[in-house]
Image: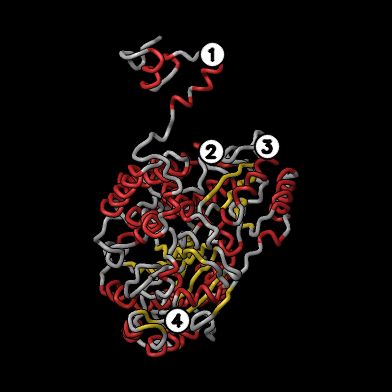
Amino acid sequence: MPNGNSNGSDTGAVVAAVLARHGSDGTRLMQILREIQEETEWLSPDILTRVAEGAKLPRGQVEGVAGFYHFFHTEPLGSYRVLWSDNITDRMAGNADLMARMCKKLWLKPGKVSEDGLVSVDTTSCTGLCDQGPALLVNYRPVTRMTAERVDQIVDLIRHKTPLAQWPAEFFHVDDNIRRKDALLGADFKPGDALKALKSPQEVLDAIKESGLRGRGGAGFSTGQKWDFCRAAVGTGPHAAHYVVCNADEGEPGTFKDRVLLSSYADLVFEGMTISGYVIGAKKGFVYLRGEYRYLLEPLNAVLEKRRAAKLLGKSILGRTGFDFDIEIHLGAGAYICGEETALLESLEGKRGVPRKRPPFPVTSGYLNQPTAVNNVETLASAALIAAKGAAWYKSIGTPKSAGTKILSISGDCERPGIYEYPYGVKVSQVLADCGARDTQACQIAGASGLAIAPNEFGRRIAFEDIPTGGSFMIFDNTRDMFQVARNFAHFFVHESCGFCTPCRVGTTLLANAMDKIDEGHGGEYDISDIWRVIRTLKTASHCGLGQTAGNAVADTLQKFRPSYELRLNVRDFEPAFDLDKALSKMREVTGRDDPGAHFHINHRKSRSGLGTKAGEPS
C-alpha cells in the first residue's frame, strides 16, 4: 500500500521484481502496472518501456492500457493523491465546499500538482461510500465522513509528510451500515456449509435453475441457464478451460452493497464461486475487484488463505477427487465501463476495458476465449445459499417472477442510509418509510443509468417485473434540484465513456454541454429538442449499455420534473452558449476602444456604423 513517502528510486529493480512475480505474463498487465505504480507513484515513459520489453508487448499497447484507466498515472501527481468522490450524494453532503477548503489551504488548484510535487487534489466518480460521505481517496485508501475539521487535519498531515500508516485509524474506518437483514444477510451460514451439501454437478445445476435465481447486477438473466450454457460449451486450443468470474466492479453511482458483501460475507461469495466452478467444470476463478475497493484486497486474500487451509479451495476440495478450484483477485483501476462483462474480460486479459461485440457471448468465448461464467457478487452469494438450503426454500421468497431477496444500497435524503435487504416485491413506499425518508420528491433507482420516479410511482415494487435494479437507491427530498441531479449524471457519463464508439463518445459530451448551457442561462426550447435528439441517438446507436442508458436520467427528469428545467429556459428558441461580444468587453476596457470594429455582433456593428458594414471589416 502506498504510504505517501515513496521516492520512486530504483524503478528498474521494482519493474524487474514485479514482472518476475507475474511471470512477465502480458495478460497480467493490469496487475503489473498497478503494483509498479504503488511503488513508484507514477508510470514514467521509462517504466512503460521496461514493462513492454519485459512482457514482450508492443510499447503502444502498454501505454494505451496505462492511459485508459483513471487510476493509472503517466504523469507525476504527487506523493499524496487526493480524489474527492463526486457523486450527487457527496455533492448534497457538501463535498464541493470541503474540497475548495482543502485546495485553498494547500495553495493549489483542482487537478494540479503542488509546486513542490507533494500533493494533488481532484475529483473522481462515485467511490461506493455514499452512506458515509462526503468521502475521498488518499492514495486509493478511503477516508469517510469528511468535515471541515477533518480537512484541516489532513492538510496538516500532508504538509508534515506524515505516512498514511500514521494517520488516525478512524479516518479510514468504513462501516457496513446494515439496517435490514433477510434471507441472505441474516442467514445462519458457516464456511463449507454449501460445499458439504453438494450432490452431482447436474443436480446442483438443476437446483439453481429450479430456484429461479436471476442475475443481481441488473440484467436479470437466469443464473441456471447461464451456467448451463457455459457447462455445455467446449474450451478451445492447447489450454482449453472453463472459468468463473465474479464481477465486483460495482461502479454505478449510489451502489455499495457489494462492498459490504465482500467485507463481511466474503466466505459466502467465494463459496458461490466454488459451486459455480463445480457445476461448469472450471478450476480457476477471478474476482474482478473495483479499484476504489483496493483496501479490501489484503482482507480478501486472507479469507482465501483460510479457505485453502480448511480445504475449501485448492486440490480435491473437501476430499472430493477431481474437484479442484482456486480463486484469484484481480484489481481494477477506476473504469466504470469494466462493470460491463465483456469490458471486464478485456481488462482481465490486460487490455483496455472496451466492450466486445456480441455474439459470441462470454459463456462460449469469455476469458482468453474460453467458456466463462460471469456473475455478480450478490448472485454468487445467493447461489451458495441455494446449494445449502435448497431451491424450494429460495423460491418461496419473493414474487413468482423474482425469486429471493434484493439488497438495496440506500443513500441521499433519509435518516438511516445504508444496506437494506428485502424479499422481491417490496414497495418503494415501504423502503422510504423504513429508512426514514421525508418529503421525498424523487428516487433514482438503479443508479445514473436507471430510473427516476416521482411520488405518484412510490407504490411500484422492486422486482424484475416492475422496477429491476442492481441495488442503487438514491433519495431526493423537496429541497433538491432534479435538474442538477441529472446534470451530475450527464457529466458522469462523459467521464466514464470508454470512447470506443462515436455515438457515445460525442453524444455524452453533447448532452452534458446542453445541460451546462441551460444551467448557465443560455437554454431554450431548441436545446430541449436537441437533448431529445441526442438521447435517441445514444439509445439506438451506441455500442454498449453505457451509451444506451446514458440519457435515461435526463429523459426521466425532463418528463417528470420539467419545472426544474423550465426555470432555466431564458430564451424562446436558440441562443449560443458562448457570448463572444461579451467576452470581448474586457479587452475593450483595456484598449479603450468601443468602436464598431471592436464588437462581434453584426447587429451591433450596423447600429453603430450603418447598413452595409461587414463582419470582420475594420472600422
Residue at the disc numbered 3: 107
Compare marks 3 and 2 and give the one earlier in the sequence.
2
Disc 1 from disc 2: Cα separation: 40 Å
Residues tagged 3 and 2 counted as in contact (Cβ below 8 A):
no
Residue linked to disc 2: 75
The C terminus, quarter of image: top left
Q: Mark 1 against mark 2, which lies toward the viewer?
A: 1
First-in-chain label (3 vs 1): 3
Question: Whole-Å distance between the Cαs marked 3 and 4?
Answer: 51 Å
Q: Note whether 527 is above or below 458 in the view shown.
A: above
For disc 2, the neighbor class at 10 Å (few under 14, some 14 to 19, many from 20) is few
Label pair 4/1, CB-CB below 8 angstroms: no
Give the residue type that dot 3 points to.
Trp
Q: Which mark is residue 591?
A: 1
Of circles 2 and 4, which is in front? 4
Q: Between disc 3 and disc 4, whose residue precedes?
A: 3
Judging by the rendered image, the residue that carries numbered circle 4 is 423
Q: Position of residue 258 (x, y in %)?
A: 50, 68
Observer-side mark, 4 or 1, equals 1
Q: Amino acid at mark 2?
A: Glu
Q: Give residue 345's quadrant in the image.
A: bottom left
Location of residue 402 (image quadrant):
bottom left
Q: Amino acid at mark 4?
A: Pro
Mark 2 or mark 4: which comes first in sequence? 2
Q: Earlier in the sequence, mark 1 or mark 2?
A: 2
